[in-house]
Amino acid sequence: MAVQPNYRGYNPVTGDDIWTITGALNIASGGEAVVESGGKIRVESGGETEYESGSSLKIEGGATLGIESLGTLAIESGGLFTLALGTVLNFATGDVSLTHSAGKLTLTTTWAEVGRVGRPFGVELTITGNMGNYVNALKGYVDASNGGSIGLLSAVNCEIKMPSGACAGAFYPLE
């Protein structure tokens, strides 16, 4: 199906003409689509943007990829979400959720600031079914082999919220 631009009207608030595209919009090799300052590309309910093997979406310096309220960034099986060195991934106030069902999630971080305190990562595991022989919410490892000064050091700070009802098994804050 060929691209059919449809004029939807004029926005008197912004002074912009509004166009819609019906059908596929293909940008040939080396081509580009430019959205000027203040412009938007909006995918309406049920629509999607798809990037095939070898293609990418670049967010260049000063630009923002915003995922609005109730929006989702889905990275399919085998996909990567890569942040370049020095990139900041900022989550505004509120909780950040990660749903992960198999495999391993690894967070590697380096702290070099003098006087730094805190925890680089927190994990909460909610159990809703019968588990196997063991369950660990987190395995912690601190590499202090490069020296420095350490006040109080532990690989993992562990707490257990005890069950409100009967629950068979043994409870250990550390394995």
Image (spheres, rainbow, N blue to C red):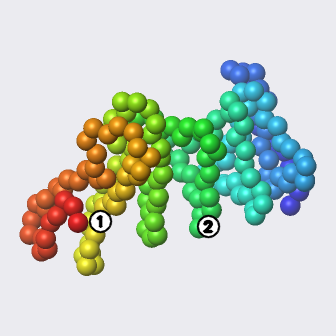
Q: Position of residue 69 (x, y in %)?
A: 49, 41
Q: Write the residue at 45% across / 66% down.
A: 104
Q: Write the residue at 85% across / 54% down.
A: 26
Q: Position of residue 31 (x, y in %)?
A: 90, 47
Q: Amino acid at mark 1?
A: Asn
Residue position for label 2:
78
The answer to whether residue 140 is left or right of residue 103 is: left
Evaluate whether residue 68 shows in this view: no
Q: Amino acid at mark 2?
A: Gly
- Between 175 and 98, the residue placed more toward the observer is 175
Residue position for label 1:
136
The single residue placed furthest to the left in the displayed view is 166
The answer to whether residue 172 is left or right of residue 13 is: left
Secondary structure beneath dot 2 equals loop
The local crowd at label 2, few if under 14, some if 14 to 19, many if 20 or more residues have their Cα within 10 Å, is: few
Whether tag 1 and tag 2 are in contact, CB under 8 A, the answer is no
Q: Write the residue at 15% across / 66% down.
A: 171
Q: Position of residue 137 (x, y in %)?
A: 31, 61
